[in-house]
Image (cartoon, grey):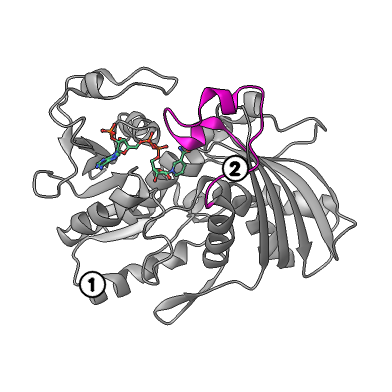
Amino acid sequence: MKKFKAAVLGATGMVGQRIALMLSVHPQFEVTALCASERSAGRSYREAAKWVVADEMPARFRDVVVQECSAKNVDADIAFSALPAAEAALVEKEFAAAGVAVSSNASAHRMEEDVPLVIPEVNPEHLGLIDVQRRKRGWDGLIVTNPNCTTVVFALAAKPLSDAFGVKTIIVTSMQALSGAGYPGVASLDAVANVVPFIQEEEEKVGRECGKIFGRVAGEKIERHHAIVSASCNRVPTREGHMESVSVSLEKNAGAEEAKRAMREFRGLPQKLGLHSAPANPVIVMEENDRPQPVRDVMRGGGMSVCVGRVREEKALENGLKFTVLGSNTIRGAAGAAILNAELLAAQGYL
Ligand code: NAP
């Protein structure tokens, strides 16, 4: 299998660490640069990164010297970006202009007309925008983005429903883990034994991104999907995994059993292509009435599956269904999402 040289931008952060860990055993991507801010540059990775993910720091990265996020000094075919949005806005463009393919977690470019916002099981055809992007911007490189960690979780569960029955309205209430805010993240006095009913910009992002992801390619841009998406986002004191209560109004009536079958049988392009990070079952349907739970279920499918439970009728909506869905915010919602996008880029000849 061809190996691509990979840089991790924001390698010392919560998502960057997860990316480094996943790439340390990846058959297609070989890490050639770990990059972060000027605070970390020049220090060894073990000194610069306060290691917060569960597995150990890969031994071969410990003494690697962290570099600044500058395309001039970095030798890479692809850059995985886990930068804060403000930094990503400049740095990702610099890398793309220098011929590097950027697979980004940041929100900076997600809504730009010629930038694909992709969940490989949901809208792989949006990668076609890369040809438009390269032509318009004169880049040899590219930028592809994955959605916000809240969006990806319910979007994966909604895709089989959208395909089989059509979706008119989605109402989602999230219970989002502390790791979603990065490290050190939420202050302990706000987090412990508490719920914070506000996450800056999150509800707006969820609505905007869902319309684009479920939209269709129309010429050189994406025509947004017509579904109304209403989100209420809460920070709760769990460590990993965003849990979401979802109510949907469907175009066609579907019973709970039909909906569960559609979710269970759903397979996307990554499964058909056998991509390395693709879970066998993107949507796992659980029958126990007290599941899914973050502590027990968040790592199903290596953290790349979402788990759905409590599928039942929603009497308050026309053709209504409601369910609970859980997904790993740092893997399916971030690191794994960017890596799966990169695997799809490679499979489709964009690298
Ligand atoms: P984080 O833990 O705060 O890490 C931020 C990283 O960016 C660190 O490596 C930091 O390096 C680097 N950085 C900060 N300022 C920089 C600058 N001026 N120049 C270069 N590098 C700089 O954040 P995170 O949670 O990993 O999130 C990273 C990105 O992924 C964000 O855009 C976030 O919205 C997105 N995201 C996060 C999640 C999640 O579950 N956490 C999910 C989806 C998307 P230093 O250590 O040197 O400061």
Element on which disc 2 rests: loop
Horizontal and vertical percent position of residue 90: 25, 56
Q: Between residue 305 and residue 75, name the one nearer to us.
A: 75
The majority secondary structure of the magenta stretch comes to loop
Disc 2 residue crowd, few under 14, some 14–19, many 20+, Cα 10 Å:
many
Quick check: which quadrant has ligand 1?
A: top left
Q: Earlier in the sequence, mark 1 or mark 2?
A: 1
Q: Single out the residue that lies furthest toward the left.
A: 72
Q: Which residue is mark 2?
A: 281
Q: Between residue 88 and residue 124, name the one nearer to us.
A: 88
Q: Which residues are magenta?
A: 176-201
Disc 1 residue crowd, few under 14, some 14–19, many 20+, Cα 10 Å:
some
Q: Marks 2 and 1: in contact by CB < 8 Å?
A: no
Relative to 130, say whether 156 is above or below: above
- Name the amino acid type tagged 2: Asn
> Would you say residue 236 is visible in this rendering?
yes
- Name the amino acid type tagged 1: Arg
**96 horizontally vs 244: left or right:** left
> Would you say residue 277 is visible in this rendering?
no
Q: Which residue is mark 1?
A: 137
Whether 51 is among the magenta residues is no
Horizontal and vertical percent position of residue 210: 57, 61
Horizontal and vertical percent position of residue 67: 15, 35
Horizontal and vertical percent position of residue 203: 59, 54
Element on which disc 1 rests: helix
> Which quadrant of the structure image shows residue 196?
top right
